[in-house]
Amino acid sequence: MERHTVKLLGVEIDTFSFSEALEYASLTSGQVVTINPEMLSFASKNPDFAKLINTSELVIPDGIGVEIGLKIMGHKVRRIAGIEFAHKMIEQCAKTNQSVALIGAKPEIVEKTKENLLREFPALYITYVHDGYFKDDEQIINEIKIRQPRLVLCALGSPKQEEFIFKVKQLLPETLFIGVGGSFDVWSGVVKRAPLIYQKLGLEWLYRTVKEPKRFKRIFPVLPLFVLKVLREKFIPKGV
Ligand code: UDP
């Protein structure tokens, strides 16, 4: 299977469908980035972060914002919810007896996530669990290295999770790492995902903002600015 990517704000994004991305990931190791408008805006100001994403093994368009951005640039690419993608990868590991590690979120949340995943997939082998509030990267890296998991899910928020994965992926050449943001908060049952209708309409962000108004400050300036940036990239190419 070959990758086909399209560019948005300097970042290469894969155009796989959900099932193609799953198939590709199941045969790959390295870093999966689930990219959203906040990360793209950050990357457009931070060349090192853009480079990190562009050297990732898979970059999936997580959410309606990225889908719209790509559409403005003339690319028809369907969004892939990172949380669903990661969940399917866990299911695959359970079916094929491959081990999984969970790193991130608060201690009680990651423990509850483990408990819920084991209830859902009794055959799943979770070889390592650690919360996301550690100071010593090296200790965690050594502990993962000993376990050699096939799949590592990192829920440290962005860009922390991407930077952590980038650091560790060279040391575990057979492992697939996915940055999953707030997914453990959802899997633990602490945060509810939006009802299906919001998900289908691409309005999950709106539901989350209404439920958790402090997110408003975080996402409100980002989305319109992101669209403006994409429009500028389309109509005023660099160097003009
Ligand atoms: N987090 C963490 N370590 C940190 C900062 C954040 O483990 O130093 C966790 C946090 O508890 C949450 C997740 O990272 O579970 C990020 O959540 P957020 O809602 O920011 O994710 P996003 O909106 O990017 O999906």
Image (cartoon, rainbow, N blue to C red):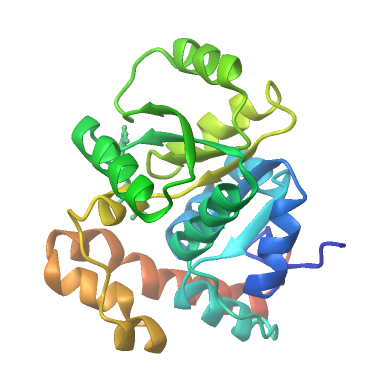
Q: Position of residue 66 (x, y in %)?
A: 53, 72
- Does residue 174 appear left or right of residue 81 in this picture? right
Q: Residue at x 71, y 25 (%)?
A: 170
Q: Nearer the viewer, residue 207 or 21?
A: 21
Q: Position of residue 166 (x, y in %)?
A: 61, 32
Where is the C terminus found, in terms of image quarters? bottom right
Q: Residue at x 12, y 65 (%)?
A: 213
- The residue that appears at 36% across and 65% down in the rendered structure is 222
List the single residue furthest toward the right. Answer: 2
Residue 67 vertical position relative to residue 88 in the rendered view, above or below? below
- Which residue occupies the foreground of this view, 11 or 104? 104
Q: In this orientation, does residue 46 appear?
A: no
Residue reaching furthest front? 123
Q: Viewer-proximal residue, 100 or 204?
A: 100
**Res 145 visible:** yes
**Quadrant field for ligand 1:** top left
- Return the x and y of residue 82 as percentages of the image width and height: 49, 61
Front residue of this view, candidates 111 and 7 = 111
